[in-house]
Image (cartoon, grey):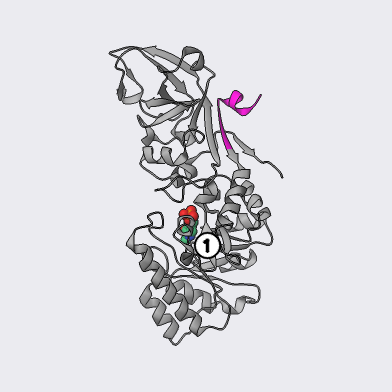
Amino acid sequence: MNELERVGAELTIDLSAVRQNFRSLSNQLKPGIELAAVVKADAYGLGVKKIVPVLTSSGCRTFFVSTLDEGVVLRELDENVTIFILNGLLPGQIKEYINNRLYPVLNTMDQIDYWQKNQNKFDFSRYSAALHLDTGMNRYGISQLEISNLVSGPHGHPSVSLLMSHLACADEPTHPLNAVQLSRFHSNVKLYKSRVRNALTASLANSSGIFLGSEYHFNMVRVGAALFGINPTPSHSNPMSQVVNLKAKIAQVAVVDTPMTVGYGASHRVQGPTRVATVPVGYADGYIRSLSCRGCAFIGKKCVPVIGRVSMDAITVDVSSVPLEESKPGTTVHLIGGPRPIDDVAKDAGTIGYEILTRLSNRIPRNYLWDSE
Ligand SMILES: *Cc1c(COP(=O)(O)O)cnc(C)c1O
């Protein structure tokens, strides 16, 4: 008995599609430009322990995560890869960084000071850090003024191997901030390189940034979402392979007629005789509540509208338009993936694919697919 039959729901994660996405993104880069993977938040909710071996076997050597704890988990998985911690170096953490050979991304002047004060603890032939430059997002990174002060100041520059910045609007190719950030990053890198002797890697682009053009690629790109099947070019069709597929079986079908309502809050009123199918997946599984009364699920290629509110453990869909035989208890309904792209789900929920992925809960059994070659 498979999980779909046993539990009534199944989350399929196609690891071969992740490998395919890594390859197709690599093919967009000029030779010598590194494709680094961002696997924060448990590889965007998909399971870092499954995802990372696929990426390393595809040739990935550099990873980014957000927290020190995520870095420690990743180090246990792989002895050799380079791991950067995006959230930076906080007081008291330095020992754990050293013990696990994790590289901090230095985001503030305080972090730079802390790093420089502790430099004697590191063997720089095998240890390094990144410096995050804020080119216009105003989130992480040192400001433009701090960069020029740092480079010309008395304390000298910190010893780092990577200069990075992050784009605020990469998924909107015509947004003027892209060109502004590109030009600032160019001059920051040039300035920094004029003062140091060691080799420096520069990195600006995330998934969508790759598609802005090769001038955004520098020496390294940092991709997360596109690896996991989210469309990096929202104004065009999705060039990536789909990775996630959530499906469930109809648990029961109710026949209702006016003047009845469906679900909590009586938020949906039927207009006439309606067949309402209950599907055993709810917001506790990651089918988020803002999908209440929004969009549809699919039976085969047929859209069955989600009616009523999403509850913790179930949703209700209107299957009136589907023949009885094809919409009875046990029929498979596609919720995310397949005929229902994750970006469409996100749009209907008023969010982005990233949030849909990272909210998928572990309650639904996961089936990891892998075609070895
Ligand atoms: C999350 C993150 C990325 C990856 O972004 P995607 O859009 O998922 O490719 C790259 N760089 C930084 C700094 C990030 O925080």
Residue nearer the viewer, 211 or 186: 211
| Residue annotated with mark 1 | 221
Rendered residue at 39%/77% (across/down): 146
- Of all residues, the one furthest to the left in this rendering is 259
Other residues around mark 1 within 10 Å, as few (<14) / some (14–19) / many (≥20): many
Q: Position of residue 46 (x, y in %)?
A: 56, 44
Total labels drawn: 1
Does the magenta segment cover residue 7?
A: yes
Residue 308 occupies quadrant: top left
Q: Amino acid at mark 1?
A: Val
Rendered residue at 44%/28% (across/down): 297
Residue nearer the viewer, 116 or 320: 320
Residue at disc 1, CB closer than 8 Å to ligand 1: no
Image: magenta residue range:
1-12
- Report whether residue 67 is seen: no
Does the magenta segment cover residue 74?
A: no
- Report whether residue 165 is seen: yes
Position above or below: 245 against 193: above
Rendered residue at 35%/29% (across/down): 293
Position above or below: 299 against 111: above
User: Which SS class for mark 1?
Assistant: strand
Position above or below: 212 against 338: below
